[in-house]
Amino acid sequence: MKRQFEQWLLEVWYGQRWLAKYLLLPLTALYCLLNALNRWQQQRQQIQHPVPVIVVGNLTAGGTGKTPLVIWLVELLRQAGYQPGVVSRGYQRQAAGLGDEPLLIMQRTSVPLVVDHERNRAISTLLQQHGCNIVIADDGLQHYRMGRTLEICVVDGQRQWGNGWCLPAGPLREPVTRLQSCDFVVVNGTTMQMRGETLVALTGNITQPLSALAGQQVHAVTGIGNPQRFKLMLEAAGLLVTLHPYPDHHAFTGEELQFDDDLPVLITEKDAVKCREYAIPNAWYLPVEAVLADGFAQAVLSRLQGVPHG
C-alpha cells in the first residue's frame, strides 16, 4: 500500500494527474503557511557555530544527488587543508543504524560523522569529539535553526521542479524563489555529472569494467529518488536495461534481487550498503563520483577564505 501511494504521488508531481493535483492544492496552501511560520520561528532561534558550516540540500522531496556532492566536498576540503566532518539526520535509519547516505559517506571517506535530527546538537558533538574545523550538513537546507556559512542547492536536471507546486500537490519543499538566497546551485546532469566506470561484485571485491557488459541485457534494481537517472547511465554505457524501481530508501530483501535467469543484476552503491549481506551471484553495484563544472571548486574555497575555522 505504501509503495502504491508513493507511486501515485510521483504521478501527481511528475505526470498527468491534473485533477489530483488541484484537489491537493488546499493542503498545499496550508503547508506553505505553516512552513513560512516555522522558518520564521527557526531563524529567530538560529545558532551560529565557531567553524564554517556548508549546507548541501535540495528543494524537492526525494533524492537529487546530494550524497556524491558531499563526498566530493569532503575530499576537496581535505586537499585544501581543512579537517571536515559531516552531520546528517540519517533518513529512515534503523534505531542502531546510520541510514543509507551517512553509511555510504563514511565508507567512502572515513570522515567523522554524527547522525542526529537536531543538527545543532550534531554539530556540537562533532566539534567536541572529533576536533573538526569545518562541517558539511547533509540535507540541511530547511533546518533553519542551524546557522550556515554557505548553502549549496542540488537540482535534479531531469525532473527539476515537477509540476512546480509545493507539497503535497507538488514535490517542492519550498518555492523555487528560494534559490535566490542560495550561494550555489548545482544541477545534476549539467553542472554536475556522475561518473561510474567500474562494477564491484556484491559478494566480494571482484571488479569489472562497466563497458564489459555493453550490448548485454541486465536487471537494474533501485531504491533511489530518481531511478531513471541510473537507467540512463547504464544505457549510455551500452547496456540493455530492464528497470525494477522501488521507493527511495527501500529496505531490500534478498528475493528482490533474484530473477529466473542468469542475467547480471546491477544496483547503486547507495543500495549496496544495505544488500551486502545477500550472497547473490552475478549481482554488482556501481560506485559513482561527482564531476563538477570547471571553477566550482575554486569558487567554494574562495567563499571560505577569511572565515574563522578554529
Image: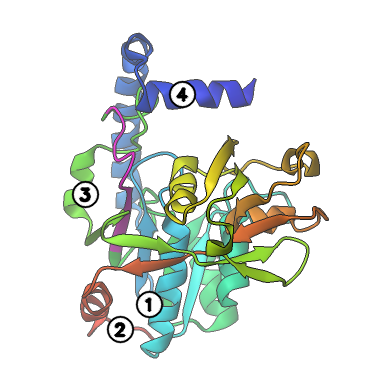
**Label whose residue precedes the other's in the sequence (4 or 3):** 4
Mark 3 or 1: in front is 3
Image quadrant where residue 290 sits: bottom left
Q: Does residue 148 lie above or below 248 as drawn?
A: below
Mark 1 or 4: in front is 4
Compared across the picture, whether 144 is left or right of 113 comes to left
Residue, far front: 215
The residue wearing badge 3 is 179
Badge 2 marks a residue whose secondary structure is loop
Q: Are marks 1 and 2 in contact (CB under 8 Å)?
A: yes
Residue 32 is one of the magenta-drawn residues: no
Residue under the image location 26 percent in, 74 percent down: 300
The residue wearing badge 4 is 9
Badge 3 marks a residue whose secondary structure is helix
Question: Separation of disc 1 and disc 4 at Cα?
Answer: 41 Å
Residue 161 is one of the magenta-drawn residues: yes
Q: Check disc 2 and give the amino acid type.
A: Pro
